[in-house]
Amino acid sequence: MSSLRQYLPAAIVLAAGLALWEAVVYAFSIQFYLLPAPHVIVRSLGETYPVLVEAGLYTLTEALAGYALGCGGGILAAMAASRSPAFTDLVLPYAIASASVPIIALAPLAIVWFGVEQGSKIAIVTLMTFFPTFISALRGLSSVTPPALELMRSCAATERQVFVKLRLPHSLPFVFTALRACTTLAMIGAVVSEFFGGPVKSLGVYIKSTASLFQTRQAWSAILVTCALGLLFYAAVALLERLCMPWRGEGGET
Amino acid sequence: MSPPIIEAIGVGRTFRSRAGATEALRDVSLSIEAREFVSIIGPSGCGKSTLLRIVGDLVEPSTGTVRVNGKAARQARLDRDYGIIFQTPVLYDWRTVTENVRLPLELAGRPHAEREARPRTLLRLVGLEAFAEHYPWQLSGGMQQRVAIARALALHPPILLMDEPFGALDEMTRERLNLELLQVSDETAATVLFVTHSIAEAVFLSSRVMVMSPRPGHIERVVTIDLPRPRADGMRAATRFFELVTTVRESLHEDPALARDAAPPDMRRP
């Protein structure tokens, strides 16, 4: 298991970075509305946290709902597609192409289609997370090695057994790589979609409106909350990954 | 005399690809009695692995017929009449050693008690009971191949098909596993069809060695190995062993490269 000592260097770097930030703000007398010092942001966080908690929950709900729909849909679609190599060859180029489309550009249209509330944000997050998950899961399900399949065949395994006992577990590392990357995408999708319009009590709108009023310290504390939520989300999925793949113990490849 | 447990008549196989057709095997016939240990040896690309896969119904022959355990090769596969061991261990890395050995029992829908007991017995047989709960990446190459042997034996198959199983191992591990394999095949009374490109290994293990020609592969010569059974490590130094190695090597002489790396230097002297 990982010990606290392992994280010590990272903690030192964080502390040093914050100290440097403080020092630079004071040394160059930077105006607080341009770049507030860390302790100012923390103080502001203490004052505004009831609003931020509410806004954070609102935005996190969008990210989680879209993530569940997008990743879940991606995995199910990959399972269906993997049953037919011909279909896979047909859809994979389009899936890969759509993964490079900046789906966030659709956010203003999503508001037209799904309303200014959470629906439009969930739709964007769903789209943003669907394709990466679909591609990774499909790669995982179809990249089984020929000898691994020959072994199944030599044991007279049924198609269903090959799927459950070989393709599915083989695809897990691929799927979790996508699931981890999609946590970040989901947070970006939710917050940036909110920039295009949404209720006041959401992180994106809060950041945008405070920043445009030069209330920089409030904007920063909301950004801090966004970062913290993103990290928590990522950590939760990473933990789930460890639980689902116990064979990748310490010393194993990651 | 009992009917042969493995019988191939006029087996040929041509692979077609965009680059054209490749004739891998031509008119191969062989007949193996129950409890025999038969090695197939030949230069790289002579189709010996293809022949083994045809016997196991993993590859379809283009011509000819194969009968295994008194039935068509396909039926023998569906009846799980053979266990197969590949060049690489092909262990599933998400399964522990025990779970890997248990896989054929699960696939065959064997009862729970057997799924629990059989892997334990087999891991004792291959000397890995201490590693039952380890994952494959925690084992050495030799240990992984032992797990593959245990897995192949899970359903008490009358036949073992082995495709250069020790080719990737160092010489010392290989010789130890040769002895273990002989012991296992004796204890389980299995018929073994063993593909190798090591002359010494083929002679040491087998009751007969079938020498294949380069592509298109066919059986050039069958050498009966009359060394006493059970085999012991000391026999590797016996005069008769060297004579048989020489016989097999000379049968392979069309491919000098193979004869060179298959024999240790001291055996090349006249």
Image (tube, coloured by chain):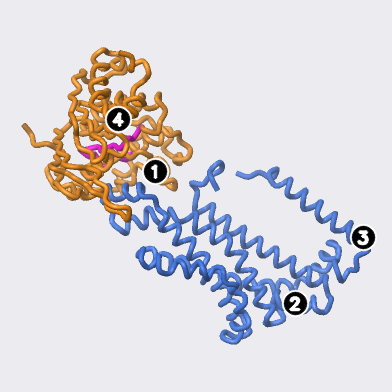
Chain colours: A blue, B orange
Q: Nearer the viewer, residue A172 or B22?
A: B22
Measure the C-alpha gap from mark 1 to mark 4.
Answer: 34 Å
Task: Read off the residue under disc 4.
Answer: B255
Amino acid type indicated by mark 4: Asp
Mark 3 and mark 2 on one chain: yes
Mark 1 and mark 4 on one chain: yes
Amino acid type indicated by mark 2: Lys
Task: Read off the residue under disc 1.
Answer: B91
* Residue B190 place in picture, x, y as percent: 21, 33
Mark 3 and mark 4 on one chain: no
Q: Is residue A237 magenta?
A: no
Measure the C-alpha gap from mark 1 to mark 3.
Answer: 61 Å
* Residue A116 place in picture, x, y as percent: 63, 84
Query: Could you tell me which secondary element the residue under label 3 belongs to?
Result: helix
Amino acid type indicated by mark 1: Leu
A206 over A162 or under it: above or below: below
Q: What chain does mark 3 sit on? A: A
Amino acid type indicated by mark 3: Tyr
Query: Could you tell me which secondary element the residue under label 2 belongs to?
Result: helix
Q: Point out which mark residue A26 bears.
A: 3
Q: Point out which mark residue A206 bears.
A: none
Query: What's drawn in magenta, residue-wise?
Result: B151-166
Q: Is residue B153 magenta?
A: yes
Quarter of the N terminus of chain B within the rendering: top left
